[in-house]
Amino acid sequence: MSTWFVRSIGILAVLLTCTALFATPYIPEEILDQQYEERLQTQPDGPQVPPTPFPERSLFDELDEYENDWLQLLDWQMGMQVSDIGANFGGQREGEQDWNIIQTDNTQEVLRDWARYGFLTGDTATYSEYIRNAWQYCEEWPAWEEEGGGNPNYYRVHNSGWGCVAAMEYYRAYGDTTWLWYGDACAEYLDTYRLTVNVTTTGTNPLSAGFGAGALYLYGSWRENQDWMDAAQEIAEDVQAWIEYNPDRLNNAESWAMSGGTAMWGVVTALYTDDHEAGAEWIPQYTEYMDLYSGPGTWNNSWTVWYAHAWNAIHRVLDDAESLENVIWITDWLLLQDEPDDDGGIPGTEDQYNNDQSWTSAYLAWYTLELLLDVRPDAQALNVTHPGVDSLLTGQPTTLYATIRNGGMEPLDGALVSVQIGNYAGFALMDLPPLTHTTASLTPMWIPDEIGETDILLTVTHASDTVSFNDSLAITQDVYPAAFVNGYITSGEDESPVQATVLLYNDPEMGGLHQAARTDSTGLYSIRLANCEEHIPFDLEVYPEESRFAAQQSLNHTSMPLGQERVDIALDTASVLLVQEGDGNIYDSPMCETLFYLGEAFHPWAPWSERGYPDEEMLSFPVTIWSCGTYETDILPGEARVAVGDYFDAGGSLLLHGSGIQNLWGGFYFLRNSFGVDADSMDIGRDGLNYRMTTSGSYGILDAGFASVEGESIDETVPVNGGMGVMELDSSGMYTAVAFESADHLYRTILAGFDVDRMFDYHGTELPVERSTFIEDVLTWLRWEVGVFDDDPDGTTSLPSAFSLNAYPNPFNPSLQVEIALPEQGVLKVDVFDVLGRLVCSWHPGQLQAGNYSWSWDASASSSGVYFIRAAAGRQTATQRVLLLR
């Protein structure tokens, strides 16, 4: 043993008293022995199978499944790392219900898996910060100084084995020598402090010694250190003798977090990794004793995954189908443990789905999933698609796309992809990164010329592809004769031609876009669609280029067989401008769907297109809906703010919505004074699926109820400067939507701190407040204009023609006269609110006939300040701002 190692052991021993304060004590061997004896009395003899059949899943039929499970597991582990600064920073929590148990073995295990991901994929960035933090913890609480008392003990041997493989995988991924000293120290511990194992030994020592031997052999071989390799084989020979003395130990020696599979893995790894011939002679004598399933018990998933690790090692030596099949079976059984919560974590004990364990999950990543990734085929022709159409049509040029899967661990650059269809041949050269799908277009375009079933053969070839059976895909595609829909798009005012994009949907319920066309200078469009010798239902949507025209739907058409259908559409004038940030397809937005459903005449505007931000165009719209989406850059630059300010000066009202919205503004003054929201106090980052939101607010914009927002960050917004909170976040009293009316009643705004497009919309069938209801109520409020009370100048009473409210004098002290014009019978309510939205007083005369009514409010008991008078009758509302001056 080297002098530096002795010195470091001595120094770190001083720290041992500190580690006990932060790490959970290991289970003393006498208690483990007692638990083991009790388990032997209740456990059936011989290998066991699960109480329910293993799931049947072919490795090659589900190429993506194991990779998705592996990536989900690695991502889940990120949430288990301690991020709080302190003694445990960077350590890995043991389990979801063992949140305060942080240990070195847990930390090394996931550190090794994250580093292995970097080595296999070449992506060394995703987990680099977490790996760096984990090393900081390991340096503070090294493997050879964890609990147990005395050297050696099973716990420190087990932990030092993990330290070896963690240091090895880290260097292989990052080429960084910083932590080689740590791996060397762990290897030196395993060589120096060897557990006592003879043929009569019971308990945990043979299992931990087996793991230590296997890990030391892998590390010593990689470091080219023959002394460590010899030591590993010496330890493994003792464990091998222990197995041979009583082979049933391979299925019943289940203790702590290990099992007989741990011992078997160590023997096979240390003795037969480099001697397959000898392994082929010894291993088959004992595989009949090997378990697939441990049976029930505390931490039985951990025992089971160790059996998978042993079968994994056996397969690498024997290259046999049976061992690989056993690994697949055990993997699928353990992955079933994740299905109830589907978060990637695996519990240590079967059926304890609410207490996933970081260590069991780390075991699964190495012991089974990495093998299944490694033995998968290299490349496979998965799919060929043709974009934007649901069927192929004669005479229509079509680009074919090939999606190719590289299932191996090595990149396949310059793969040749070819497609053959009769006399047509298309090609593409593709670079295929490991473990990913890659899609490329094939050239030249294909023009179908025959009606009926057409055979398409896709093939991928590469010199380094080692698996050939999965490199081609044959599919049959129907080609239909073409029919046409055409017509003219014109102005509804004077029948002049309108430049527009026309979309045809032939599967309206699914929203499947079939074809698109643009009108010519005469307003004529023509769309080709499949003629299936039946009437084909389709819908049309028209999106005009000139802002004064509204987008329009034309629904429920049926094309004629072998013919042509003409659909002319006259466009209305738009009254709502829909501005949508981002770089997506504005035509597919849920907001367009909602406005169509509500029958609103709207014009969509995409700032990311060649049109830029609207300027003077906005002035013709009384209401604008401006969607910031989920973007985190400053998407409303100075010139756009100027345009919005001019819009407000012209009396235009606006709904602004989006998540992370406080990051979108270059000037908080504008936000505070135009929307009544304190930008400095906005809180971002409330991520999560289906945040429940309850509506409220003095302006009465929304009916009380709930709304559900899908998977988005939702902001808290703080009303200031007369802004009124109108939508609560999680019923907590914090607002996520604020309504604001200018002091001179010229315009109104609503700022919603979430993406309204992500609001669920069931068209009134499930949720009391949904997207369509929200937008309908918001538009009603934004369109409100202050009414003027109109007495008949001749002194005779006349019925009012419109609902209105007039409160005077303004300012007042202390009496205010409130007059309401009610054009039709209804239930009248008049409420007074202060600037914080608190109800001050009310007048609710109930059901009234059409006519003019008045009410006097004595404000003697109220303090000076701004108040809001709100009158409502049915869906008709009016609000006036008044000022009490004493």
Image (cartoon, helix red, strand yellow):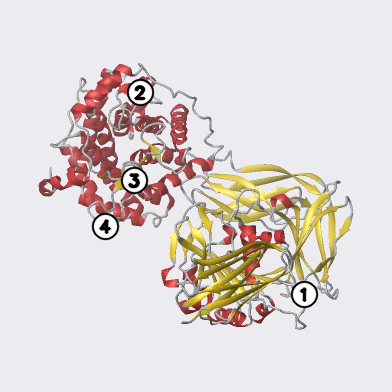
The answer to whether residue 671 is above or below residue 531 is below
The reply to whether residue 475 is visible in this rendering is yes
Q: Is residue 493 left or right of residue 212?
A: right
Label 1 sits on residue: 798
> Going from the N terminus, do you reach mark 4 or mark 1 first?
4
> Going from the N terminus, do you reach mark 2 or mark 4 first?
4
Q: Is residue 580 left or right of residue 540?
A: left
Nearest to viewer (mark 4 / mark 1): 1
Instruction: Kindly check if marks 4 and 1 are in contact, taking CB atoms under 8 A apart as contact.
Output: no
Residue 370: x, y in percent? Answer: 42, 41
Amino acid type, label 1: Ser
Q: Is residue 598 left or right of residue 221?
A: right
Amino acid type, label 2: Glu
> Going from the N terminus, do you reach mark 1 or mark 3 first?
3
The quarter holding residue 248 reads top left
The answer to whether residue 199 is above or below residue 669 is above
Calculate the distance from the C-alpha at mark 1 to the C-alpha at mark 3: 81 Å
Calculate the distance from the C-alpha at mark 4 to the C-alpha at mark 3: 20 Å
Label 3 sits on residue: 110
- Numbered label attached to residue 281: 2
Amino acid type, label 4: Ile
Residue 492: x, y in percent? Answer: 83, 71
Q: Nearer the viewer, residue 51 or 717?
A: 717
- Numbered label attached to residue 85: 4
Mark 2, other Cα within 10 Å: few <14 / some 14–19 / many ≥20: few
